[in-house]
Image (cartoon, rainbow, N blue to C red):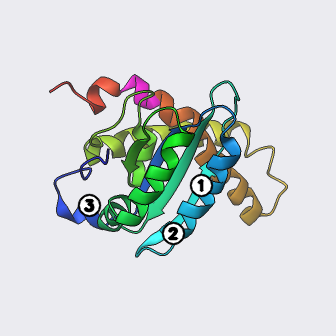
């Protein structure tokens, strides 16, 4: 259920970590699931290192998948919560509400940009590879925005213009550029061993 730490390097255990948990809820059990989520979220907040939890409800009622985003200050604190007796009790209460066992993926830092669709990530790519692909993504995005958007925003105060350009850069990198670059460089990022 819980993946191993993302790398054997113990210093990585001190990085902020996000768990992305997927639940397919049985039709008609959505209200029960939402009540369950509020209860487990309250208990998670009491654990050391907890930095926040949120849920993304399904966009399509034909596929009622809720995605829970859980953040902790380090992998060990996340692991303590995920393996706790309190959480196991909540998971037992969850079983009548879901169609199949939950799926958990743990991510830290930049590797959230380097996930492949329908391919659970066991370990992130090497840091230098993530840095190179991120650099390409930032270069490509900033080049486009400097060419097309900055001239339009020229009349705005510098701080506001910078705020808009950096916000759009992050959004484009997260939702458009990095998923495509990850697909493009997938064989280099994730070589078959």
Tell me the CA gap for discs 2 and 3: 26 Å
SS assignment at label 2:
helix
Q: 9 and 84: which one is in front?
A: 84
Q: Position of residue 106 (x, y in %)?
A: 37, 49
User: What is the distance, in whole Å, between disc 3 and disc 1 at their CAs?
Assistant: 32 Å
**Tag 1 secondary structure:** helix
Looking at the image, which residue is at 59% across and 55% down? 37
Which residue is disc 2 drawn over? 43
Q: Which residue is mark 3?
A: 12
User: Residue, x 38% and y 54% (percent of image)?
Assistant: 108
Q: Nearer the viewer, mark 2 or mark 3?
A: 2
Quarter of the image with the C terminus is top left
Asked whether the viewer can see residue 178, the reply is: yes
Give percent across and percent down for residue 110: 41, 50
Name the residue furthest right. Answer: 155
Q: Position of residue 138 (x, y in %)?
A: 50, 43
Dot label at residue 36: 1
Q: Is residue 62 magenta?
A: no
Q: Which residues are magenta?
A: 181-185
Depth order, front residue of 63/129? 63
Q: In this image, 119 relative to 97: left or right? A: left
């Amino acid at each position: 259920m819980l993946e191993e730490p993302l790398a054997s390097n113990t210093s990585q255990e001190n990085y902020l970590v996000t768990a992305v948990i997927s639940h397919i809820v049985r039709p008609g059990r959505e209200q029960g699931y939402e009540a369950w989520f509020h209860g487990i979220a309250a208990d998670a907040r009491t654990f050391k290192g907890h930095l926040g939890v949120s849920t993304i409800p399904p966009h399509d009622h034909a596929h009622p998948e809720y995605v829970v985003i859980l953040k902790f200050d380090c992998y060990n604190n996340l692991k303590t919560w995920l393996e706790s007796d309190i959480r196991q009790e909540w998971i037992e209460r969850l079983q009548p509400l879901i169609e199949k066992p939950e799926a958990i993926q743990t991510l830290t830092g930049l590797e959230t940009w380097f996930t492949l669709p329908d391919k659970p990530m066991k370990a992130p790519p090497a840091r230098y590879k993530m840095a190179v692909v991120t650099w390409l993504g930032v270069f490509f995005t900033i080049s486009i925005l400097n060419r097309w958007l900055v001239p339009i925003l020229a009349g705005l105060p510098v701080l506001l213009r910078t705020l808009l350009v950096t916000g759009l850069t992050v959004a484009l990198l997260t939702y458009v550029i990095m998923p495509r670059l990850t697909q493009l460089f997938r064989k280099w990022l994730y070589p078959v061993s």
